Image (cartoon, helix red, strand yellow):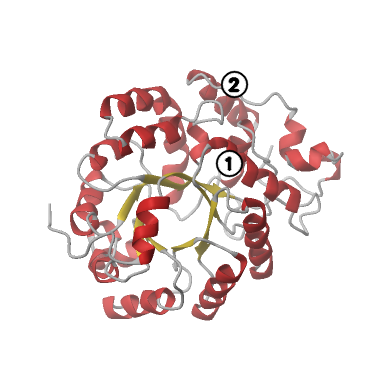
Amino acid sequence: MQPPKESLKSSPQKQWARQKYKGIENLLMPSFSPDFKNLDEAGIRHDVRTGIRHGFFSVCCIPVGVTTEEHKAFLKTACEEAHGQILVGDIVAEATLAGDLAMIAFAETVGCTHLLLAPGRSLQAKSEEELYEGYLQRINATSLPIILYASVSEAYRTFGPSGVPLRIFDRLADLPNVVGIKLSQPMSLTTAFQICEVLGQRLLVGPVNLDFVPLLAKYYPVQWSGQWNVEAVQSPQKPYAVELMKHLRDQDFEGALKVYTQLEPALNAFYRLQAPLILKGLHPWVHMKYFQWCVGGNGGLIRLLPGHHGNVPVLDAAGRELIRKTYHTIGIDPVASPEEAFMVGQAAYERGVRAQELVQKPYYA
């Protein structure tokens, strides 16, 4: 293990992260009206409240299928509903540098607590120095705590292990507002180990792969996981992932492994669904909404997305049944609401909206 270059306690943002950024952070996805022309604010608020009931320390807004202005409205609604009970992060991934900088500035004004920097669309660098400068422009534009995003990328294959630009992240890690790094799925354990060796004493490491977490937490400051569909492995009544991280923060590895054994069947099922898609830069968005709905979330369908037609699985009856059966295998009873409530979103269903009002049913059969 390398000696630390800089203490995690060396700036106000890094101190904040050590104290506040711990546990499980989920993904907050947008909800839409039946005609898909507007956001459903009530559905978004419903999901923030559900995140609190799960025991998550934070929700991270993922702007899937929204315009820039809708992204702002989405984030503003989430921050309003959170009102200090839960942190609210945002994923910075606009199409241009100017778009990223504008979204960063907006996030500050509405009360966002931190940012995940994932400039994949807006930062196509040909050299390490160009990539470093691109990150630096975004990080220096704010005092908000920043989470770096370590994902397997062919585009950055020459910049570090498995396409993770580790040498650049090594330089960024000493900046005062860079506080953590998310290790995406799929990623090999060896790549995760390499990242931890270089950054693990300066940044809070957040592996998505919960099967890596007990081992890495034994040697590195792993106190969080998230920004993924964590609802796939727990419910508010049985918050397995939240309990797992608490045991590990307490260095109770026996307790952590016991909880891991309980959630493992659901974790494996979710990874089998999602991992092949992530390698293509895709996600099973409607499946993810269904997972959330099954354990109290708003649910609802999403807009048609460019490049997704024919490339992501449709949520059909067999898929829905498999998800519900998987919950049963880990002792969780999914919600008993009619499937129609998922299609329109729970909040809309409760105010009288029905499936016949949907103008289309994207990725749903």
Please give left or right for residue 267 compared with residue 31 in the image. left
Q: Disc 2 designates what residue?
A: 333
The secondary structure type at the circle numbered 2 is: loop
Residue 231 is situated, as x and y percent measured from the top left of the image, at: 53, 36
Kindly tell me whether residue 301 is visible in this rendering.
Answer: no
Residue 276 is situated, as x and y percent measured from the top left of the image, at: 42, 44
Question: In this orientation, which residue lies closer to the viewer: 225 or 163?
Answer: 225
Q: Which quarter of the rendered picture does the C terminus lie within?
A: top right
Question: Tag count in the figure?
Answer: 2
Q: Residue visible at 52% across and 74% down?
A: 100
Q: Residue visible at 27% across and 76% down?
A: 128
Give residue 178's quadrant in the image: bottom left
Q: Residue visible at 50% across and 31% down?
A: 234
Residue 330 is situated, as x and y percent measured from the top left of the image, at: 48, 21
Please give left or right for residue 156 compared with residue 65 in the image. left
Nearer to us: label 1 or label 2: 1
Question: In this orientation, which residue lies closer to the viewer: 244 or 155?
Answer: 244
